[in-house]
Image (tube, grey):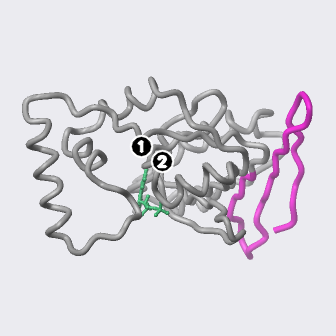
Amino acid sequence: MSTVKLQALNEADVMPEPIAQFERWLAEAKATSLAEPTAMALATVGANGRPSLRMVLFKGLHNGGFCFYTNYGSRKGGELTAHPYAALTFWWDILERQVRIEGRVERVPKALSDRYFHSRPRGSQIGAYTSRQSEPLPDRAALDQRLAETERQFAGAEVPLPEWWGGFRVVPETMEFWQGRPNRVHDRLLYRQTDSAWTIERLQP
Ligand SMILES: Cc1cc2nc3c(=O)[nH]c(=O)nc-3n(C[C@H](O)[C@H](O)[C@H](O)COP(=O)(O)O)c2cc1C
């Protein structure tokens, strides 16, 4: 594992816009040996007001929002459609850095989902087309059989973008940058969107 010198997080050094600050930190995370620097936890709210949480992969920014791709009919897809707010957390352990994002959720344009879907390996396209994500399945063999059926259905042809699959973007209202510091006296800077600009506030660790 590479050793990284931890830096202080100071108001004077951060970017005035949190997305620019995020891009700087993500580039630094990608430069380490971290296996999945784009992995983020996604929290949604169910109809009962209870949270649910799972990992997804960050796939870029679109119209100021953090994009990920999934099955719109999955548990998360249903929860986001009914309650379009989410929280995201990145954790880059080597750097002792955490980024928290909260905001409103929107679907990305179909053309963007289509482009991303067809940039994936064919096996992933077949998998996404076949899986009714989050629904129960009798056993693994049933899934393998359905995958083989999808392979046959699209033999020699392009797999179309499933209408139940695509991207969401989380448009941040707040973003917090957390830098680990000695003795657990960490640095926390919270960006909050006001009418025209972002404010930056330091929080106690
Ligand atoms: C590192 C990692 C990355 C993942 N990325 C995605 C992703 O980008 N999209 C996705 O739908 N599921 C992804 N998953 C699977 C989800 O965590 C989850 O199991 C799945 O989306 C079903 O969640 P749901 O039932 O809450 O909708 C990933 C899992 C891990 C561990």
Q: Quadrant of the C terminus?
A: bottom right
As drawn, the label of residue 3 is none
Of residue 104 and residue 88, the one placed in the foreground of this image is: 104
Q: Is residue 186 magenta?
A: yes
Which residue is found at the position 23% from the left and 39% from the top? 121
| Residue type highlighted by circle 2 | Tyr
Residue 139 relative to residue 165: left or right: left
Identify the element where label 1 is drawn.
Answer: loop
Residue 50 relative to residue 5: left or right: right
Which residue is found at the position 57% from the left and 33% from the top? 61
Which residue is found at the position 61% from the left and 49% from the top? 81
Q: Which residue is mark 2?
A: 72
| Label 2 environment density (alpha carbons within 10 Å; few <14, some 14–19, many ≥20) | many
The answer, for residue 167, to whether it is visible in the render is: yes
Q: Percent position (x, y) of residue 8? A: 73, 54
Q: Is residue 4 magenta?
A: no
| Residue type highlighted by circle 1 | Trp
Q: Are marks 2 and 1 in contact (CB under 8 Å)?
A: yes
Q: Percent position (x, y) of residue 95? A: 57, 57
Identify the element where label 2 is drawn.
Answer: loop
Q: Percent position (x, y) of residue 86? A: 67, 53
Residue 91 relative to residue 9: left or right: left
Quarter of the rendering containing residue 180 = bottom right
Q: Which residue is mark 1?
A: 164
Of residue 48 and residue 198, the one placed in the foreground of this image is: 48
3D distance between C-alphas at marks 2 and 1: 5 Å
Write down the region rendered in magenta: 176-205
Asked if residue 123 is positioned above or below residue 197 in the image, the reply reads below
